[in-house]
Image (cartoon, rainbow, N blue to C red):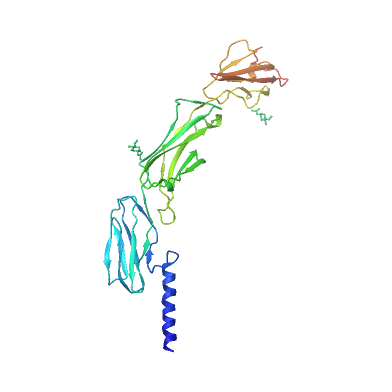
Amino acid sequence: MFQHFTGFVYLFAVSQLVSLAGAQSECPLQLDPQRVVVRYGGSVAVNCYTSVLHKGMGWEASEGAVPMTRNQNLITWRVSELTEWDIKPVCYINPNDRGQCIVHLPVTVYKTPDSVFISTVNHRGPMMEGQQYELQCDVHNVAPVQYLTVKWYKGQTLLHQTTFTDNIKTPENKTVTLLIRPDRADDEAEYWCEAELDLGAEGPQPHPTISAKPLNVEVYYKPKHSNSTETIIQDDKDMLDCTVKVNPAPTYTWDHLKEKISSSVLKSSELSPGRYTCTATNTLGRDSKVFIVKSTGILHPKMKR
Ligand SMILES: *[C@@H]1O[C@H](CO)[C@@H](O)[C@H](O)[C@H]1NC(C)=O
Ligand SMILES: *[C@@H]1O[C@H](CO)[C@@H](O)[C@H](O)[C@H]1NC(C)=O
């Protein structure tokens, strides 16, 4: 009867230990939390707890070590300003019923970048439509790069992202490049990059993110009218509108007119019926548009020809 009872207590204690130790190990120690993420220079505190009788337990660490103590079952590793990138704290115990065992505390020490900067590689001034250019994003002094993502954006659109596999714990500089081939719709577009540190569930939320000051891109392209021909019925309001959105700004010329006109818009009421061709020209090319002016049948008093 007595034996049966002792056996029950023993089993109960073992099952409790197993649940406390979790997946870590069979060492009868429980860390709380089981992993920490600390800003470089920040503070940290982690409890190490046991429920078994022991001859001593302690923390070993290059900062915040706790000497072996016998009469406690909870000891705390505590650092008020953590300034070691690769710290590996260990909690140990000498249980009464077996040899020493240890549990490692995984520590991630991080630092957000000092700066994130975007630039164009080997190029200055406007970009030409259809040509390829290289953008560069420089991320300075960030750790650990294993948790870094560099994201590229055009306006609010995510273009690309890069992660890193280096297992270096100390701060690093990272340079990422992106090839772009801008088109006319990209004139005045804002390109930018950002550095994000995703340190996992134990890390800061939202993820620390530093963005570069956007790069405003100017794109040069050839004039192109959306319609190459337009029919206009003469009237007081209808215009021959040759205006085309293009960069750099074009000059306009009109054929089949007696006088030279550089305006992009003509009043249909001041013309006689017929074909009029307008050409928009800039440094990259030219594009023409034909206007067919038709009479309403009523002679207009202001008609010139
Ligand atoms: C990062 O760049 C800075 C400035 O250019 C430099 O002083 C520093 O040594 C670099 N760090 C590394 C790890 O290369
Ligand atoms: C251009 O052509 C399209 C389709 O032929 C037409 O829907 C549109 O109204 C035209 N635009 C102008 C300014 O004439």
Towards the viewer: 288 or 147? 147
Q: Residue furthest top?
A: 258
How many numbered circles are shown?
Answer: 0
Q: Is residue 297 above or below residue 97?
A: above
Quadrant of the picture in which ligand 1 is shown: top left
Q: Is residue 48 above or below residue 111?
A: below
Q: Residue furthest right?
A: 297
State the residue at coordinates (44%, 70%).
19
Towards the viewer: 100 or 13? 100
Towards the viewer: 231 or 192? 192
State the residue at coordinates (30%, 66%).
75
Q: Residue furthest bottom?
A: 1
State the residue at coordinates (55%, 31%).
185
The percent coordinates of residue 292 (x first, y second) are 69, 20
The percent coordinates of residue 131 (x first, y second) are 54, 27
Q: Is residue 17 left or right of residue 302?
A: left
Dividing the picture into quarters, in which one does residue 31 lie?
Answer: bottom left
Q: Quadrant of the image for the C terminus?
A: top right
Towards the viewer: 241 or 134? 134
Q: Is residue 61 above or below residue 167?
A: below
State the residue at coordinates (49%, 35%).
178
The percent coordinates of residue 166 (x first, y second) are 43, 45
The percent coordinates of residue 294 (x first, y second) are 71, 20
Q: Quadrant of the image for the N terminus?
A: bottom left
Q: Is residue 168 above or below residue 155?
A: below
